[in-house]
Image (cartoon, coloured by chain):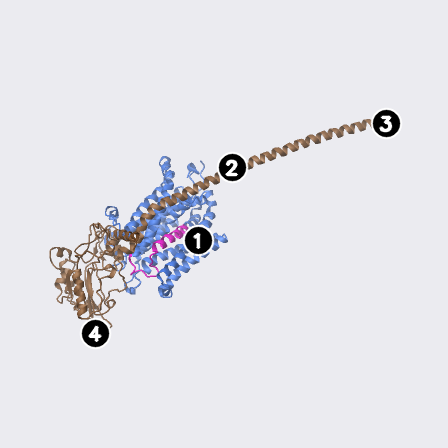
Amino acid sequence: MDKSKRKFIGLAAVAGVGAVVPKVAFPHEEFSGYPDGYGVLHDTNLCIGCRSCEAACNEVNGLPAPDQPFDDMSVLEKKRRTNHKTYTVVNEYKTSESPELPVFRKIQCNHCLEPACASACFVGAFTKTPEGAVVYNPSVCVGCRYCIIACPFNIPAYEYNEPLTPRVIKCTLCQPRVKEGKLPGCVEACPQEALIYGKRDNLIKIARERIRKYPDRYVDHIYGEHEVGGTSWLYLSGVPFDEIGLRTDLGNTPAPELTCGALAMVPIIVSLWPALLGGIYLTTKRKEKIAHHEKTTAVNDAIAKTQAEAAAKAKVAVEKAKKDKEFAIAREVKKALAEAAKQSGEEKK
Amino acid sequence: MTNPISPVKRPLLCPFNVITGIIILIGLPLTFMRFTGGLGAVANINDTNPWGIWIGFDLLTGVALAAGGYVTGAAVEIFGMKKYHAALRPALLTGFLGYSMVVFALLFDVGRPWRLPYMFIFPGTTSVMFEVGACVMVYLTVLFLEFCPVALEWLGLSKLRKPLIRIAIPLTILGVMLSTLHQSSLGAMFLIAPSKLHPLWYSSYIPVFFFVSSIAAGLSMVIFESSLSHRNFGDMMDETHQASRDTVTLGFGKAASIVLAGYFGIKVVGVAYGNHWNLLLTHYGLWFQLEMLGFVLLPCFLYAIGVRDKNVKLIRITALITVLGIALNRLNITLIAFNWHLPADERYFPHWMEIGITVFVVTVGLVIFRFIVTHMPIFFEHPDYKGSH
């Protein structure tokens, strides 16, 4: 890689990650998350769909009471998503391999290493904390909902029925509890240890180990290790990930990289356009001036020429008239002489 | 000091005033509902489809169709095409009112509109939305300053008007720069969602597509708007304006034909770059082809034929087709081809009250437009300032 290209990528990284990662003195060519960030490993092979995590989440976060109680398992019959009352939901998936034995997956914010929501927010309401959580600050949020458009996992919800103080609603990875040294509510409540909280690096090691030990039980992939640049929430599965509602076509490009090229054009246009358009304006003006000058010169020349021609013509005409007059006089004189001669001849007779 | 025009008397109870009055009377309670019950009380937007027609039509289509201001400004002031001078003021007015209505509509759409200035206090510079917001706000100011001389001539404040006329060129350049930025950024906003926008519409070139198509939109809107104005406000036009009517239509039609040809070219490049030829015969592919062939290539040819045959009527119809095509494109990107992978019951369809508010916003714009052109020197030169701009 040549130096200028590397420099460009460095600048792009600053442009893209700058707001997400404060104080990046020497931008890396590639940002791969805070080194000591925490996350959660969700092993869907262990999940029994008991909804304990949902109940715990609701309780520790003081969320509104659910429409149906948490021990009502009939809600699993329908595909659900996070909404303004819930940070997390568990869905049931019928898979191709074992239709009679469903797989459960917990859905919540994946706490991306380079979050699309944070990159998209025009007032910087989202922050990726060094601990791992992507947190939302409702005190600056304008409510444009671009974060919801940007999120590849369709996670953030909005208080659409709140007239004056609507907020974006999403999982906080229990940031306040983590700061107190506690586990996230859902992790603490899980009776199956289908959720493990820990340093993301360690979680990846644990996940790899499980895949290595039980290759017939797991798909050889840790979902979230690289997807959209990596997420703090990681998944293991025994069935293809797209069968448990996790899109496998998202790619590994972090969201900020998708827009940094377009944003990099802004300063170029700001600095180049005035010069370019000013230049065009001045060229046009000069052209007009030259055209005007040429026009006046041409008109003056034409006038002078016509005047000269007219003068010449007039002179010729005057001379001709003079000649005609002289000729007429001469003819009259001649005529008169002839007449006189004739008369005198007649008199002689 | 003779008045160059002889306006007809416009009665207060004319059909225009009655119809717009009814729409505004319906719009007011809808507005009340929006700000007492929240977005969900009037709009079908939800967690999966956070943006509806207020963004797809009012913002994206609105901004594209208000491009006539910068396009005409660039043609007349920067490229020196003085023969289109009569089109400048109507175009600037349409631009100014268009952007005002865009911002007005945004006040309905964003959750806490009174916080919009926060973008300058807590700027999220990594966001394309920040660029759009900042540019639209600054550009609205530029359009206001460009429009000011009209109001000042009307009010007879020639001392205030003079410095504004003097900075017309820098303002035009600033306007073109800001328009280049935000017209393209409106497209760039979707760069962050490759997994949600259909691949035929998603492209890393989408900012360029938006910018180029905004030029075609601006040119077509000037033609379309001028044909409507001639029908409705012919009495407000002086001889110069009347005489340059066909010149503007033919000239702008020619330019629009060329721009549409270029736009079609880069859109083909977009499909080729993504190698999405195989998608062209899917349902979405056919819809894409309808947009590209019916609303880009067809008007491109019709404009060319209209210009060749000096068929002003055909050019005007083509302008309408182009305007509809731009609206279709913006709606495809925000709503129709967005979340295309989701099942039908998770897709968005506007609520009638959402459409009602959009109609209300457009109507307010039309009423202000009508007031201004029937009172201020838009279609005629003010006798006191003849030839002074």
Q: Amino acid at mark 4?
A: Glu
- Kindly identify which residue carries mark 4: A100
Secondary structure under tag 1 reads helix
User: How far across and how far down the image is residue B120, in percent?
Assistant: 25, 46
Q: Splitting the image into 4 quarters, where does residue B337 fall?
A: bottom left
Pick whichever of labels 4 and 3 is earlier in the sequence.
Answer: 4
- Protein chain holding label 3: A
In three-dimensional space, the C-alpha distance between marks 2 and 1, rounded to whole angstroms, equals 36 Å
In the rendered view, tell whether residue B288 sits above or below residue A282.
Answer: below
Which residue appears at 23% of the width and 73% of the height? A97
- Kindly identify which residue carries mark 3: A346
User: How far across and how far down the image is residue B381, in percent?
Assistant: 43, 40
- Do marks 2 and 4 share a subunit? yes
- Protein chain holding label 2: A
- Kindly identify which residue carries mark 2: A297
- Do marks 2 and 1 share a subunit? no
- Protein chain holding label 1: B
In three-dimensional space, the C-alpha distance between marks 3 and 2, rounded to whole angstroms, equals 72 Å
Residue A342 lies in the magenta-colored region: no
- Do marks 4 and 3 share a subunit? yes
- Protein chain holding label 4: A
- Do marks 4 and 1 share a subunit? no
Q: Kindly check if marks 2 and 4 are in contact, taking CB atoms under 8 A apart as contact.
A: no
Query: Of discs 2 and 4, which sits in the foreground?
Result: 2
- Kindly identify which residue carries mark 1: B258
In three-dimensional space, the C-alpha distance between marks 1 and 3, rounded to whole angstroms, equals 98 Å
Pick whichever of labels 2 and 4 is earlier in the sequence.
Answer: 4
Q: Which chain is displayed in brown in the rendered image?
A: A
Nearer to the camera, A202 or B220: A202
In three-dimensional space, the C-alpha distance between marks 4 and 1, rounded to whole angstroms, equals 61 Å
